[in-house]
Image (cartoon, rainbow, N blue to C red):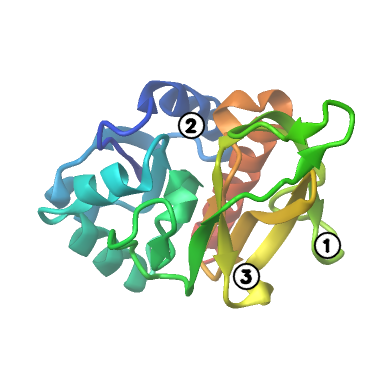
Amino acid sequence: MRIVALATGVGNVRSVLRALERATSSAAPGAEITASADTDVVRRADVLVVPGQGSFGAFADALDGGLREALVERVRAGTPYLGICLGLQILFEASDEAPGARGLGLLTGRVRRLAPGDDPILGRPRALPHMGWNRAELTAPAAAPLVAPAHYYFAHTYAAAPNDPDVVLTTTSYGDDVFASAVQKDHVVGVQFHPEKSQRAGLSVLERFFSALSNAKERR
């Protein structure tokens, strides 16, 4: 299994690589993990992992020059995709953070600014970014969910608003706002939280993701 973690310079891919190594040691033994922004490497990937932190606009700019086309081509050909934080947001068409910047458009909808309202105790607006531990809740019962109900680590000001509610795996509340914290459509998965910073709960998400791929490969 050739896993390519997209290394665009937007976010710290090193901590993601360490988490991937730990998860695949049991879930996908022998997996080859590469960090790259080379379009040829992306096109040879069996699995794409797309992490990112910071600005949607900067991330979208980093995909120009061939990466955008390579990602869309591979995902439409059936290559599994796991997006983390901005890697989830870039799946959608656009973001309020960067009007005019194009997402991948693999899922319909936009990325919007969180609206958590006021903190009644402090008597002022709740802080943004939404940063720290918070709980993800399933949108529907599942015997063995990819993203289990648990606390995960978040660091973001914007969140995806999918047009199709059926793609939402989990939601998370922050003050008055409820946002999609994990999405999935077929072989495309995105999480708004950082599994690499979410200790055992985050590692379990990665292990389940790669175990499912390994099991599917063995059945073929």
Residue name at image x 28 percent, y 63 percent: 100
Farthest front residue in view: 123
Name the residue beneath numbered marker 2.
20
Is label 3 in a helix, a strand or a loop?
Answer: helix
Residue name at image x 15 percent, y 43 percent: 38
Q: Is 34 situated left or right of 125 in this image?
A: left
Is label 2 in a helix, a strand or a loop?
Answer: helix
Callout 1 touching callout 2 (CB < 8 Å): no
Q: Report x, y in % for residue 54.
A: 40, 35
Is residue 82 something that shows in the picture? Answer: no
Between residue 14 and residue 12, name the one nearer to us: 12
Name the residue beneath numbered marker 1.
142
Name the residue beneath numbered marker 3.
167
Check the image and report above or below for 1 versus 134: below
In 3D space, how far apart are the residues under numbered discs 3 and 1 (Cα atoms)? Answer: 14 Å
Indicate the amino acid at tag 2.
Leu
- Tag count: 3
In 3D space, how far apart are the residues under numbered discs 3 and 2 (Cα atoms)? Answer: 24 Å
Closer mark to the observer between disc 3 and disc 2: 3
Q: Earlier in the sequence, mark 3 or mark 1?
A: 1
Residue 195 falls in image quadrant: top right
Q: Report x, y in % for residue 162.
A: 57, 69
In 3D space, how far apart are the residues under numbered discs 1 and 2 (Cα atoms)? Answer: 25 Å
Q: Report x, y in % for residue 13.
A: 37, 28
Indicate the amino acid at tag 1.
Ala
